[in-house]
Structures are given as structure tokens and as C-alpha cells.
Amino acid sequence: MSEFHEELRIVLAGFGGQGLLFAGKVLAYTGLIDDREVSWLPSYGPEMRGGTANCNVSLSDEAIGSPLVLDPNVLIAMNQPSLEKFEPMCVPGALLLVDSSMVPVKVGRTDVEVCYVPATKLAEDAGLKGLANIVLVGKLFAMKGFCSWDTLEAAIKKCVPAKKVEMVQKNLDALMLGVSA
Amino acid sequence: MAEEKVMFDRPHALLPIVTNYCPGCTHGIVNRLVAEVIDELGIEGRCVGVAPVGCSVMAYKFFGCDMAEAAHGRAPAVATGLKRTHPENIVFSYQGDGDLASIGMAETVHAASRGEKITVIFINNAIYGMTGGQMAPTSLPNQITQTSPYGRDVITAGYPIRVCEMLSTLDGVAYLERVCVDSPRNVRKAKAAIKKAFTYQSESRGYTLVEVVSTCPTNWGMTPQKAFEWMRENMLPYYPLGVYKDVVAEGFENAAEAALKRAEACPMVNVQKEA
Amino acid sequence: MSEKVLMKGNEALAESAMRAGCRFFFGYPITPQTELAAYMSKNMHKVGGVYLQAESEISAINMVYGASAAGARVMTSSSSPGISLKSEGISYMAGADLPGVIVNVQRGGPGLGSIQPSQSDYWQATRAMGHGDFHVIVYAPSTVQEMADYIYEAFDVADKYRTPVMILADGMLGQMMEPVVLPEPKTSLPEKPWACDGHKNAREHNIANSLYLTAEDLNRLNFERFERYETIKQNEQRADLYLVDDADIVLVAFGASARIAKSAVNAARAIGIKAGLIRPITLWPFPCDCIKQASLHAKAFLCVEMNMGQMVDDVRLCVAGSKPVSFFGRTGGVIPAPLEVLDCIKSLNEGGR
């Protein structure tokens, strides 16, 4: 598969428990399935417990150097501290996906593309509490088309643990919610 | 000509090597008892010993079975590695008081608490012998050593550790006995204890340890006879001889069964695991 | 061949070790290597092996010593402070010629340091992995794939030369996920006639030991061991060369920092600077030959490390004063940025130091 050439350097950031590492894993699996170069790097340490959590995902057709994303061209921000921390690092023209039900402020920069999605509220209203992360993945898919729907669906199936198989459909619903948001 | 019969010989498991032990030291007796037990149980071919750091540091040369030399205090950890790799083998460590109860106390306690199926032969002579007579974790209160020249002051140097008593609280332990080797009768009792420990190990009953209250004529500065007298007079009241744990005598098959009974009020202990 | 899977570096190390025939793991919890031990605790019993959480790193390495003496394929893993505790046992293993694999998923130091990625144990791994005259073979993987590949190889090399082997990784490589193709499980392992596994009344007793009280004996054994080290130096030097042939500025970097250095080399080439990268894969034996070779045409060398400058010593020894050798480093968990490295390359290319 070589139809998707754009290199994505993605930072997903928010509170621990919002499923950012999981969302990053879904993105990474799309790369694995499409035989692209992939890296996934979590922040780790005491800050994981209830504090901020972030994860870096690179999807590329070239070998990936540092898995640490210092110049993201995609930022998924699920709380205000994360937006404030990572907004300045984004390259001009980057896509910022902001969960506007969690982040009360607006992006200050004018040289980036901003998309506000009330992902947490949308998910809760649709009976998909806890899947705002996947709503945002759906939105990213809709905007960047970094893989096919089949690949994305397969990635979800890879990431949902076998013991929670009933969660597959909910994740797919959340993706669709994001696509149409 | 009258038929000749061998009445006394070197045990097969003890190699014909001159030991480094001082004259009058009890290490020689205990080395021999261990070797006799190995012979009598017929286990030399599947026995692996661990020598410590201390006076018995050269024991890897003396025993005829396979031997590993451990770092100071780490013999129970090395024995764990040997035993876990070949559970069918009989693994013993042979350690002094500094090795076992000071630098190696963590390894001792945790090997016992895991119920490692090993046998520990513990020589307690209340002093560091090889390094020339320093205070040991088992040196008695007011005992004069090179590093307690005014006598062990328990206020600053703390109290001696009674190893058998302490280990008897641990659930992984199958058998603990404290013996000494100051008379033929006591030597026979010591051998019986060592044999029981090895036997329990071969029956996978749990962790086993035999503490031999010993002497160090050289560093105590006494003749061997005087050293035994001092030991009987001072050490035995502090370290009473006897069996400190024997799960079989208590009516259990092994340490695990005894542990289960002891903790039967705790629901977690009785959780049935899925196969 | 196995299919490509997405795995954390720590998990790839664990799975590949089991495929290499490792059946004994003795560990103690420490960040950031935790996933390795967790993976072993979940899976080792499925292949008939033993996972044991020791009471300390000290105990864990001595269990490794015992299992290795008994003939097992055995490993332990830790991170920097824990490796310091294991260093005594590693010295004893080297002194007793016992094979085994030790993984160090490095974090920042000294002391308790940080839990973020670092390469500050280079000196420890290559110079002073314990007391006494000895070396351990040190592999420095740079990708999750290499984590799997080199630990798989490490067990064979350890047995071949009867020496401890270290995998020197770091928190970034341990924590990150990348696609990896796992090696096939090994079906036959070497015989170990020296093992202390019970002589079965069929041979003399075997002894695992590092004590030699006669000076001449220990002297002779150390010389013999160093002859073996010479063989290892000849046979086991490994490095990956990237655009070195015509390079003016040759970067030298290992592990995670080599990934950053490579990005910087690409960026330099894009602006017309002839930069290249030598990436040592074995840190001991150090791949001296290719660095000497490169010194014939390079104008300058630049070491990039996540420490205060450790491997740079070895590079300087190889270059032997013939060309300038500069250093760029970050510590404490700070990851060097490719652009910072590019600035160094530019400066060197303009004749700066």
C-alpha cells in the first residue's frame, strides 16, 4: 500500500484515562496493517496516574528517526494544559484537533488549521462514554484520509482486547461519529 | 588369615583433599556429616552444593558432587538458580553466620519464604573466622572480638540474631533444627538432622535448614576443649538446641499444607485458580 | 517467517529471548523495563520456563549465576540503578566463565536520577561492569526489530564464548512500539559439559567458581580470558554505516541517539553537506576498524550521545588524534533534537569545533 504519502507526526495529549495511548495505538496499527513505517512512543512515569498523558505516533513511508515528535503536524488535544503545551510546537499548517467540550479556550495561532470537535459530549450523548478519543480518531481519518476505512476497522479490531470484544462495535460507532462530526 | 573389614573410611562424597580448616574447628566434622548423608542417600550424582564466602569458601574443592562458589551472602540465590533449573537435583548451601545472617540475610529470608526446596547448613560460631575474628550478627552480648574489643555493646551494636527462631515464622519452611557437634552423641543427632533435611528436600516438602552451633578456637583464643566448654556455657543458653519447625511432625505433608492451615481464615488464600 | 507485529521494545526483548531458548528469568521491578518482566511473568510458564521475582537485583543476578552454572539459558533485566546492584554478580559470572544475558533499559543518572531515557551507562557497560579485569559483550540496538534480533543472537554469543552479554537499550527503545518480525523459536541448544547439573557418577565434579588464591593461577586464567576477548574483538565487531563512503563529517552514535543522528545526516545531505553516520551495534567490542577507515577521508567526527560524553572516548582512541572529534550530548532524559545536531554538523562543516 503506497497510496498515502503524507508523513504524519502526531501528538495525542490529555488527561490519563482519556484513552490517548489507546487512540495512538489504533493509529499505529493502521500503519502496521498498510505496511508503512510506524512508531508509537508513550510518555511514561508517575504522571500517568491521573495526570497528563501523551503519546507520539509517526506514520511514514520513510524510516522514522526519532520517535519523539518535536514538530507535530497533527495535534489531538483533549485538555487545556495539553493544548497550551503542544500548540507552540506544531509546524505551520499543522492540523489541531481540539476536544472543545474539554478545552474552553481557542487556539491562538493563525498559521495552523484548527478543528473543534466536542468529542466528549458527542460520545456521551451517543451512549459511547469514554470513547471521545476514538471520535477524534474518526475526525482525523475524515480530514486526512491516512488509510482506508477497512484498515481503520481492522486496526480497531487489533487494539480491542479479546476479552472486550463487545467494544469493537462501540469503537466503530465512535469512529463514525467523528467522521460525521 | 582373618577377614579384613573396613570399619571407618572417608565418605565417597568427601574428596581426599587437605582442608584449610584450623585444628579443632568443627567445620571438618560438619563437612564429613554432610558427605556421609550424601553417601547414605545415594544422591552424589544429582547433588549440587553451594560454597559461601567465609572459612568454608574452599568447600567447592572438598565435596565430590558438583559445586558452585557464591558471592558473599548470595548462596541461597545461587542455590535457587541451580534448583529451579534442575528441580530433580538435591541442592544445598553451606554457610557461616556472617554470610547467612548478615550480608546474606535478605537472600536467607526470601529463599525460606519462597519455600525453595533447598537445604541450608548453617555454621553459627558467633564470629567472622576467615577475616580474623570480627563481630558477627550472632556474636553474644559482651563477647570480645576484634571489632568489639570492649565486648559487644548491645546498645550500639544491637542484639544477636536467633536464626532458627526467626525463620520458624515463615510459611515456606518445612524443617529447622539447631544442633551442635561437641560430643559423639550430639554428632549423631546432628547427622540425623542433616539427613532429615536432605530427605525432606528430596520429598519436596519445603525449605530446610540445620543450624550447627559451633566453635572457633582460633579466633576465640581457646583450646578446642575450652571452646566447647565456652560454647556450652554461653552459646547454648542463647541458642537453645532443638527442632524449631518440622511440618511433618506437626501432621502436614509439606510446608505448603501447613501454610494453608495457618491462614485458613483468609479468603484470598483459598482462591481456586483456573487451570 | 513470522508475521509483522506491533510491539514495545521491552516486549520484543522478552518474546525474542524466549524464542532464543531462554527458559529462566530472574528480575526485580524497575522503570522503564517493567514490561519485559511483566511479559515474562505472563508467558514464561507457557513454554515450560521459570519466571521468578527476586527480593532484590542482587539476588536476581545471583539466581542467574546459579541457573547459568546449572546449564540454563537465563537472563535478567533492569534499568541503570538496578544494573549497578547487579554489577557484583556480573563480575562473578565473568570470573566463573558463565554465560547469561543482562538487559539494561537505561534511565538518567547518577543516583536515582530520572526514569527518562538515557545512555549514561556506556562507561559502566564497556569499562567497569564490576570489579576486576573483564569485559562483557555489549549490544546496542536502535530499533524494536534490533531489540528482537540482537537478544536472540546474544544467547548464542554468550554460550559460544562463555561470557555475560549485555543488551544496552534505553527507556525510549523499551517503551516505544514499532513493527517487528520475530525470529523463529530455536529448536536445538548447545551442550554444556561444564554445567553443574549433577555428575550422575559419570564424571569428575564440575565447579563454577571465580576464586583462585594462587596468584599464578589467577594470572594465567586472566591472560587466557583476554585471549578469548581478542577472538571476540576479531569476530564480533558490528556497526551500521550510512552514507560514510564520501562523508566529510562522520557522526558516530548508538541506540536511540543514532536515530536522531540519522535524521540530522539526512537533513545535512539535503543542504549539500556530505555527512554520514557510523552506528556501533556492538559497544564492546567497539567497532574500531570502520572508524579508523573513515578517519582516512573524514574532515571531522561528531559523537551524539544521551550522556555527557562517554563513547566519544572510544572514538578518539580509534581516530588517534588524526582528525578532530567533537561531541554533542543531552542528559537526564532530554532527547537531542535533530535540528540541534544539524547545527553542530553545519558548524563543523564550516571548520568550527
Image: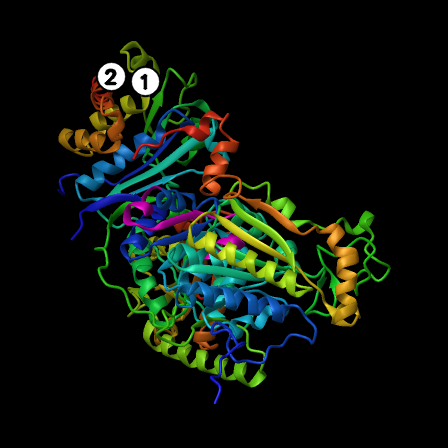
- Classed neighbour count for the residue bearing mark 1: other residues with Cα under 10 Å, few (<14), some (14–19), many (≥20): many
Left or right relative to B85: residue A153: left
Residue under numbered circle 1? A119
Left or right relative to B140: residue A25: left
Q: What segment carries the magenta color?
A: C42-63
Q: Which mark is residue A181?
A: 2
Residue appearing at x 78%, y 52% in the figure: B157
- Amino acid at pointer 2: Ala
Q: Position of residue C39 (x, y in %)?
A: 35, 44
Q: Chain of mark 1?
A: A
Q: Position of residue C214 (x, y in %)?
A: 58, 82
| Location of residue A166 with respect to A144 vertically, above or below | above
- Amino acid at pointer 1: Ala
Q: Nearer the viewer, residue A160 or C114?
A: A160
Q: Secondary structure at mark 2?
A: loop
Let me know if residue C126 appears in the view: no
Which image quadrant is residue A175 in?
top left
How far, Cα to Cα, is label 1 from label 2? 9 Å
- Classed neighbour count for the residue bearing mark 2: other residues with Cα under 10 Å, few (<14), some (14–19), many (≥20): some
Let me know if residue C116 appears in the view: yes
Left or right relative to B161: residue C287: left
| Location of residue A44 with respect to A15 vertically, above or below | below
Q: Going by the picture, which residue comes out furthest to the bottom?
A: B1
Left or right relative to B201: residue C290: left
Q: Nearer the viewer, residue A92 or B11?
A: B11
In contact (CB < 8 Å): disc 1 and disc 2: yes
* Residue C58 painted magenta: yes
The quadrant of the rendering that contains the C terminus of chain B is top left
* Residue A107 painted magenta: no
Q: Secondary structure at mark 1?
A: helix
Label tally: 2
Q: Position of residue B236 (x, y in %)?
A: 73, 54
